[in-house]
Image (spheres, grey):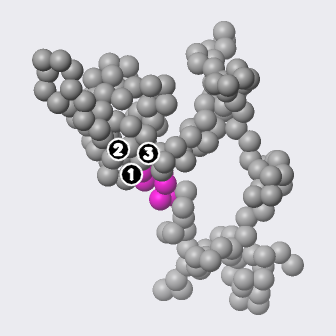
Amino acid sequence: MDAWTEVLQGTGMDPRLDRDTSNCSIARTLEIVGEKWTILILREVWYGSSRFSDFERVLGCPRNLLATRLRMLVEQGILATETYKEPGARSRPKYVITAKGMDLVPAVMGLLQWGDRYRADPEGPAVLARHHECGAHVDVQIRCELGHPVQAQDIESVPGPAFRMKSSE
């Protein structure tokens, strides 16, 4: 008997189909970073951009949308602002990645890796991800907390502490 069956043994409900998905961590994450411009802003932060004008120039994103996305990333604690001032100009904010933002690197790198494999230009990827110290290619991998490499087909999803079934109303 698997972990899902144990949850509702004898109820006639299917925990995979009748579960409450309103508390899904993936859905909550996508509310924050699930929009194209947001991911592209993060990409540019990792490539070294930090100023509004840099993002605007490289992304071509409408100013109002860019401002909204940057504000949201700051409000969510993914980016922070620091003040900088160029000689003869007024002070302005620059955007820096926070620890919370750095925790998104594997997800964005996973998108890059998938895109490089299936959506790259016929000539190859536009940008290569390499380890700064040794120059080797960076590869996103899934590992269990004990360090074992795990293939997608070997991942088991089981009910967690916040698992709930849909209301019967």
Q: Which residue lies furthest to the right in this view?
A: 1
Q: How crowded is mark 3: few (under 14 residues within 10 Å), some or many (20 or more)?
A: some
Does residue 158 appear anywhere in the picture? yes
Q: Do the residues labelled 1 and 2 touch (CB within 8 Å)?
A: yes
Q: Which quadrant of the structure image shows residue 10?
A: bottom right
112 vs 137, left or right, is: left
Please name the predominant secondary structure of the magenta segment in the image. helix
Q: Is residue 68 above or below residue 89?
A: below
Q: Residue at x 58, y 16 (%)?
A: 126
Q: Where is residue 69 in the image (x, y as percent from the top left)?
A: 32, 41
Q: Residues within 10 Å of mark 1 (few under 14, many from 20)?
A: some
Amino acid type at image mark 3: Thr
Q: Residue at x 32, y 19 (%)?
A: 57
Q: Mark 1 points at which residue?
A: 77
Q: Which residue is drawn at 69% across and 30% down?
A: 138
Compute the Cα span from label 2 to label 3. Answer: 6 Å
Compute the Cα span from label 1 to label 3. Answer: 7 Å
Q: Mark 3 points at which residue?
A: 98
Instruction: Point out which mark residue 80 bears.
Output: 2
**Where's the N terminus, which quadrant?**
bottom right
The range drawn in magenta is 27-34
